[in-house]
Amino acid sequence: MVVGTGDIQISLSWDSDADLDLHVVEPSGEEIYYRNSVSQTGGTLDLDSNSACRSTQPRNENTTWPVGRAPTGTYVVRVNHWSNCGAGLTNYVVRVIASEHSEVHTGSFTGRGNGGGRGSGITMTTFSFGAGGNRGPLAVGAIPADTIEVGASVTRSLSSYFSDPDGDQLTYAVATSNSSIGAVSISGSTLTVTGVGPGTATVTVTARDPGNLIARQAYHVTVTDPDDHGNSIETATTVAIGDTVPGVLTTEDEDFFEITVPRHRFPLRAFTQGNTDTYGYLLDHDGSEIASDDDSGEGRNFHITRELDAGTYYLRVRGYFGATGSYSLIVGSGAPPPPPPDGFRIDLVLASYLTAAQESVFRGAAERWMTVLAATELPDYEAREWSCGDDSRFNRYAAIDDVMIVAVVEEIDGPGGTLASAGPCWTRRGGLPIYGRMSFDAADLRLSEQMGYLDELVLHEMGHVLGIGTIWDDFELLRNPASVYEAPDTHFTGPLAIAAFDEAGGTRYAGAKVPVENTGGEGTWNGHWREAVMEAELMTGWAEEGGTEPLRAITIQSLADLGYAVDATVADYYRLPSADAARKIEKGRLIPYGNDIWRGPIVVADSAGRVVRVIRPR
């Protein structure tokens, strides 16, 4: 989809099927919106998505003025919630580019919508264009969501989230969507939110300069009932071996328990009972995950057994996918429960803190790949020390069935650079992965969640650990690799992936099959499908803002070419776009994953876990 640019470009994007409308009032007072798409000065609304709930992609609206045509003066930008079109919550982002001036504003809508026309919507920003004018305040980053208990308060220094390009002193105002959930107040530049009752409210902050120009941000505050147990290892409830402890999980709640193991090789057994769907984690003394479990106990309860050395350990209990209710935690010793049923297993270790919503995305990605590979059965490995290069964060002592992946969140390079980095660290002598790593940039993790493509990001990186784009060369399935010197017709020669490519409409494709990315730099070329041909596919080197990147049969069958047993019937429907119909997406609409393939040494092990050789990065 081609959209305009110019002296001024204002875009609105969102993450649901709701109908949102962009309204821009130019200095003359004329309003550009869906019923007045072209103004007398040439300002044009050239993209109107989801009109009257007719779902379209991308979910974006765009208003521009041609170069040299934008009038000098003050502009007002508003966003209107025309209809929810069945969506519950809609998050949106507004971007303003005016010559050298740029702004980003975020917010969300709930409710049914108002069907409004001219003059409707909430004001996101006012700004001046042209020499000598007052420039309006800017939003800086995004105010992160908060979770607090009833009666507790949280403060934010708003000067960290707004600035003024002219150095003007800003004043602030705040409003809440539900004062029975959170009470809000402003003192100078300090925002205070106090929990009143359980639930989630939208808090909207407005920054205003002396010239009455504004910038606005909205974010969510979740209020929970007071916690019956600690929500961190520092506040964990102490339990003894043999104890049964009652607990209650509320919205966004987690319970932590401290356990002292009395002797070497102690067979710890910890599980819950009750009707609440629990998920449990066993953590070491510094909070790193040792083991986790979902439903190995009775009903939907977790059940963890582990042989441990003497020392201090922690149990973390949460509701699976936000489940709430009461449970009983039993801590003791004894034999493990029966092993889980046969099938491909990804043991996912989350070595950094994630919110419950983020964690659900990570666990959901593992479940999706396990469904694809359910028929695969690989040799298991007894407990030993595993590592990834010289980074001790990825060291684990564990038995593995069939693959273990350790994920961390860290500061890589800030928003918009490398979103993540992933790949296998250990492989079997036959080539398939045993142990791998994923690193996610903290800023990009938050941004991808806000923009609605976190699911695709995690699923994509997990695909790299399983071998997509990372071990193709080892299987001699990559031909004509790209380099800094040339961009040949790089392609993947797996026969099953080629058959899936042809079935999706690739029989008339003139190039070599299956086309692999030959641009984008190191970490993108040679390890992803070619974006110019495949477009909306999970394993290209770019994500689509506001869109989805489905998992296609081509990608699934490429795993079969590596030796996995796959179920291609779970693939998302896909047809290759023709050359004439291919979308043209302007710069900025595609989000590069960056250098997202980890190129460290890969250790090759035999069936007993003995090191056979080490593959050094080329």
Image (tube, rainbow, N blue to C red):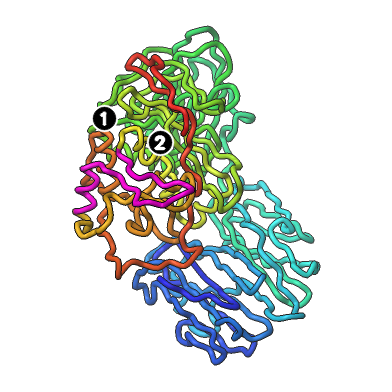
- Residue 144 image point, x, y percent: 61, 52
User: In this view of the protein, which residue sits in the foreground, 68 or 607?
Assistant: 68
Q: Is residue 167 left or right of residue 451?
A: right
Does the magenta-highlighted stretch encompass residue 163?
no
What residue is rendered at 43% in x and 66% in y? 585
Number of the label disc, if any, that sits on residue 124? none
**Dot placed on the residue nearer the N-terminal end, 2 or 1:** 1
Residue 382 placed where, x, y %?
Answer: 37, 15
Disc 2 secondary structure class:
helix
Q: In the picture, residue 260 is in which quadrant?
A: top right
The quadrant the N terminus occupies is bottom left
Instruction: Residue 478 in the image: state x and y as whole percent.
Output: 33, 41
Q: Amino acid at mark 2?
A: Val
User: Which residue is label 1 attached to?
Assistant: 343
Q: Quadrant of residue 561?
A: top left
Q: Residues within 10 Å of mark 2 (few under 14, many from 20)?
A: many
Decide if residue 322 is in sight here. Answer: yes
Distance between the Cα atoms at labels 2 and 1? 18 Å
Q: Which residues are magenta?
A: 477-502
